[in-house]
Structures are given as C-alpha cells and as structure tokens.
Image (spheres, rainbow, N blue to C red):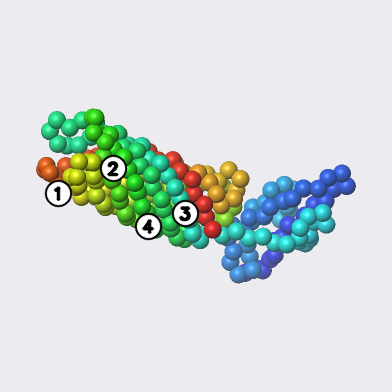
Amino acid sequence: MKHWLLALAVLTFSSASFAQKIKVRRVKGNQAVIEFSGGSLQSGQVYELAPDEFADSSVSTTSRKYVVALSASLMNTKSDAAGAQNETDLSLTGKFGWNFGSYEFGPLLTYASDQVGSITTTSYKVGGFADYNLISNTPGEAFLYGVGGTASMGQIDSGSGSKRDLMDFFVGPFVKWFPTGSNVGFRIDAGYIYQKQSGGVGSDATISGLATAVGILAYF
C-alpha cells in the first residue's frame, strides 16, 4: 500500500488572517482521513503544516473520555390499577459515565416529585444508563444521535409515612448537540417508560407511558 501524508497549511492573507481547524476522522498507520474548515486541498499535492505567526502555535487537544450530565424529565403516565388517575411526574437525574465512542455507560441518581390527583409523593432512585451512538462520539463532533436506556430502583414516599419499592426502565432515541463544537452541549430524549411499584400499603401497580427529558452534558 502506497504511503502518503496529508496535511493542511495555515493560509495567511495580507489583509486578514483566520484560524482553521482540522478534525482527524480516522487514522491507520501513517494514513489519515481528515475534515477541515476553509481553503481547499487537491489530491496528490503535499502540504506543510505551518504555525500562524499571529496566533498561538501550541497544539490543544480535547478529550471525551468521561461525561457528567444533568437532565430534567417530564412524564405523563397511568397505573393499571382500577380507578387510577393520570400521573404527572417531574424528575431530575444526574449521571457520570465513560465514553467509548460508539457506546457510553455509567451510574445515575434520580430525584422525582409525582402529582397524582391532589397527592404529591417523592422518590429517590439509583441505577445505570447506556447509550449507543449511531455517530461515534469523538472530540469536535457537533451533532450526535442514537438510542439510549436507563434502569433504576429505589423508594417512593407518599408523605404520610408509607413507602413503597419501585423499579423502572426507560428506552428511546436521543440527540446530543454541541453548538460550538466543544465538549459542552445539550441532550434531548424521548421514549417509553415502564415502572413497577410494590410493597407498603396496597397491591402492586405497574405504571407505563411516554417520557421526555432535556439536559446539559459535559465531557472531559
């Protein structure tokens, strides 16, 4: 296989200068596939990398090995118990995880406040999440989408001293958007949630429905 080197020269004009960015998409041996902003390249030509005399010539690198995230979720569900009313649930979830490009996973902690009729209950849950990115999550990637899921367990408190165990699962598509191309961005989820409540007073109940979540996330 013929070896070749692909590089980008920083262009400086007499009237103005501007910074260009190179994103390395894939590397194999001494070959690379890159994306660049501004200018143009011609196949077969050799280019030299040169520092911009008006800018900092140091090379900066970013990483997306780990993620921390905070999201708010709004759910509208209904129990399968007789005479059950629609339930509105607002929850806050914090996550920490590991990013391996195509997939991510880690633990999560959730606090939720539920409004069922005139009764307000609170719950705390711990669990884990997993994401499958259809576009590899690498530094500089501005828009990602894929499918994610969570599983958690905890307790729900009705405020009257009665507590019940709960377990829930969520699955659905997501999008991640990094508007500046940095490692800080926004995330939107939409999907289906299934929850089971057991123990305490009353019979076991299964709750299911649609859920959406919006949050911020940062990689480092």
Q: Residue flagged by tag 2: what amino acid is it?
A: Thr
Please name whichever residue, 7 or 4, is drawn nearer the observer in this view of the structure.
7
Crowd band around label 3 with a 10 angstrom C-alpha radius: few (<14), some (14–19), many (20+): some
* 182 displayed left or right of 201: right
Q: Say which of marks 3 and 2 sits in front.
A: 2
Disc 3 or 2, which lies upstream in sequence? 3
Crowd band around label 4 with a 10 angstrom C-alpha radius: few (<14), some (14–19), many (20+): some
Please name the residue that numbered disc 3 is placed on. 68
- The x and y percentages for residue 119 are 23, 33
Query: Real-space Cα distance between discs 1 and 2?
Result: 16 Å
Disc 1 or 2, which lies upstream in sequence? 2
Residue 199, labelled with which disc?
Answer: 1
Residue in the picture at 79% in, 60% down: 50
- The x and y percentages for residue 113 are 31, 40
Residue in the picture at 37% in, 54% down: 108
Residue 107, labelled with which disc?
Answer: 4
Q: Residue flagged by tag 4: what amino acid is it?
A: Pro
> Can you say which quadrant of the picture contains the C terminus?
bottom right
Crowd band around label 1 with a 10 angstrom C-alpha radius: few (<14), some (14–19), many (20+): some
Is residue 44 at least partly visible in the picture? no
Residue in the picture at 31% in, 46% down: 170
Please name the residue that numbered disc 2 is placed on. 122
Residue 175, labelled with which disc?
Answer: none
Residues at marks 3 and 2 touching, judged by CB atoms closer than 8 Å: no
Q: Residue flagged by tag 1: what amino acid is it?
A: Gly
* 84 displayed left or right of 89: left
Disc 4 or 2, which lies upstream in sequence? 4
Query: Real-space Cα distance between discs 4 and 3?
Result: 10 Å
Please name whichever residue, 183 or 117, is drawn nearer the observer in this view of the structure.
117
Q: Residue flagged by tag 3: what amino acid is it?
A: Val
